[in-house]
Image (spheres, rainbow, N blue to C red):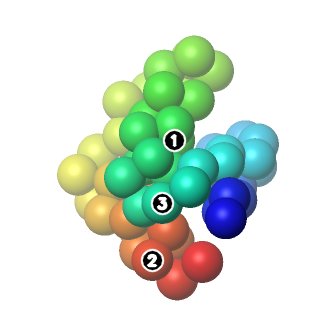
Amino acid sequence: MVKVINCPICKAEIKGANEDELLKNGLAHAKEAGHRDPTDEEIEQLRKMVRDE
């Protein structure tokens, strides 16, 4: 099952099959979209969003 979260910066959809894939895709999206590098706190917030999904 594919899970979807929204980028907290630009609200783009990020899709992945599990927590690891969502996190990997989220970090790749941030780099491709030219967002600044996420802080450790922002990465943890992303992990929480993925777990809550």
User: Quick one: label 1 or label 3, which is nearer the N terminus?
Assistant: 3
Q: Is residue 49 left or right of residue 6?
A: left
Viewer-side residue, 22 vs 44? 22
Q: Is residue 40 left or right of residue 51?
A: left
Q: Residue furthest bottom?
A: 52
Q: Residue furthest front?
A: 1
User: Quick one: label 2 or label 1, which is nearer the N terminus?
Assistant: 1
Q: Closer to the observer: label 3 or label 2?
A: 3
Judged from the image, the secondary structure of the residue bearing numbered disc 3 is loop
Check the picture and name the quadrant holding the C terminus.
bottom right
Q: Position of residue 52 (x, y in %)?
A: 52, 83
Q: Is residue 3 left or right of residue 20?
A: right
Task: Calculate the distance from the C-alpha at mark 3 to the C-alpha at mark 2.
Answer: 9 Å
Q: Residue at label 2?
A: 51
Q: Is residue 42 visible?
A: no
Disc 1 packing (10 Å; few <14; some 14–19; many ≥20): many
Judged from the image, the secondary structure of the residue bearing numbered disc 1 is helix
The structure residue drawn at horizontal position 48% and vertical position 60%, both measured from the top left corner, is 18
The structure residue drawn at horizontal position 50% and vertical position 68%, both measured from the top left corner, is 50
Q: Amino acid at mark 1?
A: Gly
Task: Calculate the distance from the C-alpha at mark 1 to the C-alpha at mark 3.
Answer: 12 Å
Q: Is residue 18 placed above or below 50 in the rendered structure? A: above
Q: Residue at label 3?
A: 18
Q: Residue at label 1?
A: 26
Q: Amino acid at mark 2?
A: Arg
Q: Is residue 5 left or right of residue 26?
A: right
